[in-house]
Image: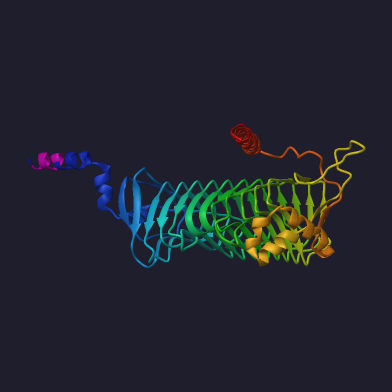
Amino acid sequence: MNYLRIFILLAGLCLLPIEAISAETSLQEQINETPSGGQLIVQSGTYEGPIQLSKPIDLVAKDGVVLVYNGTEEAVSISGQNVSISNLSVKASDQAAAAIQLTGRGHKLIGLDIDTGTIGIRMNKASHVLVERSDIRGQAEKHAIDLNESDDNQFKANTITYVEDGFYVEDSNRNTFTNNEVSEAHYGFHIMYSQGIELTDNTVEESFTGAMVMGASGGTIEGNIFKDNNENVNAQGLLLYDSIGVNVIGNDLVNNRIGLFVEQANANEVRDNLFLSNYIAIQFLEAEDNTIVSNDFRLNLNEAQAIKSSRNSMKRNYWDSAVKVDVNDDGYSDLAYVADPYFLSLTDKVPEFQLFFQSPGMAILQKMLKTTSGELLMDTNPLMKPPAIEAEGNEGSAWQVGVLATVMFGLSASLFLLGRKRS
């Protein structure tokens, strides 16, 4: 009889849902019971933080696993080496020190979903870490990913929304950022005193500044899209400040207040970029020995300005507002293009003067009151035709402008003819 009771009890336990068992076992207990090098599959459910991982294990969360934390520590603390977490949702209050705190090396965070009012992922002296395909949503007051003295890390295909800075990077070298999307941030990328950075194929839009690179030596910013960063009076697509030897190649800077601002930055290369529909396409302040070559400038209200800047080389760029004459048919205009910042300097002092943009009187004043040579940027051999660096979507933008201009011309002509008939 006793054997029968024991058999029935064991059979009943086996029939219990796995989720019910896991809900009674804290996530930290499951982590503690997992051996080094082992894998922990976390069953669906809501778990309370905080949790700590300090040994090399692979934590795989099934769909519907949520870690909730309302305390003042880190919701998830990772240290040691080779910790891997995937598919976990973390909800941390704005009182927490961070949603995820990470030190050590060789860790992987893949497919996380972080919703928090505090720092999303804070890395301190962490190296060779991969953060991939994770979503971070903030409350506009804290950084999504914060790096301090953390080298050789990779950030791929992450989506970040409504934060102070998408990526805040300080004293951290040789980090790569690829295919990330940031929107509604103060800075999409805020890079401080970090060497050898690589920003490739990222998108930053509707932010204060797409990317700020300060105090950098070397590095590449290539194939990124910085667009619609124009809601603030000081907004810009890309800011290079006090940096040297940075290559800015093949980026789209579209509809920003300032496309590229180069301040106190020397010996940088700006090549094969598209500057489209910016208030100011490119601006230099106390910057020297930079090279601007083979870029495409179109539909910008002001194309270029240099203040207290010298020895910046501009050549073989396309300027849609330039007067072009190609006598020897080599593809380059025989007339140099000079970007005179007179109008821009005037409107900076008196913004209301923007009403007189391209008016005959403003053109006469610009010819009478010559800008000093130190503020002029000259392209000695501008391109006759734009370089083939634009995406299909940008071709559509130019086509739409042409259609709009045609419609407006037709409407104006119709009104003129109707007016004549009535008279």
- Percent from the top left, x then y, of residue 302? 70, 54
- Percent from the top left, x then y, of residue 152? 62, 56
Colour convention: rainbow
Return the residue found at the far left: 1
Image side of residue 18 versus residue 6, left or right:
right
Q: Could one spot residue 416 in this view of the protein? A: yes
Image side of residue 265 versus residue 165, left or right:
right
Image side of residue 24 versus residue 323, left or right:
left
Return the residue found at the far right: 328
The answer to if 361 sits in the magenta stretch is no
From the image, give the main secondary structure of the stretch colored magenta.
helix
- Residue at the spot 79% in from the left edge and 46% down from the top edge: 322
* Residue 187 quadrant: bottom right
Along the line of sight, which residue is nearer the eye, 234 or 213?
234
As drawn, 301 above or below 376: above
- Residue at the spot 24% in from the left edge and 41% down from the top edge: 17
- Percent from the top left, x then y, of residue 346? 71, 64
Tally the marks: 0
Image side of residue 416 versus residue 388, left or right:
left
**Quadrant of the rendering where the N terminus is positioned:** top left
As drawn, 246 above or below 223: below
- Percent from the top left, x then y, of residue 124? 53, 64
Along the line of sight, which residue is nearer the eye, 206 or 135?
206
- Residue at the spot 89% in from the left edge and 44% down from the top edge: 334
Q: Which residues are magenta?
A: 2-8
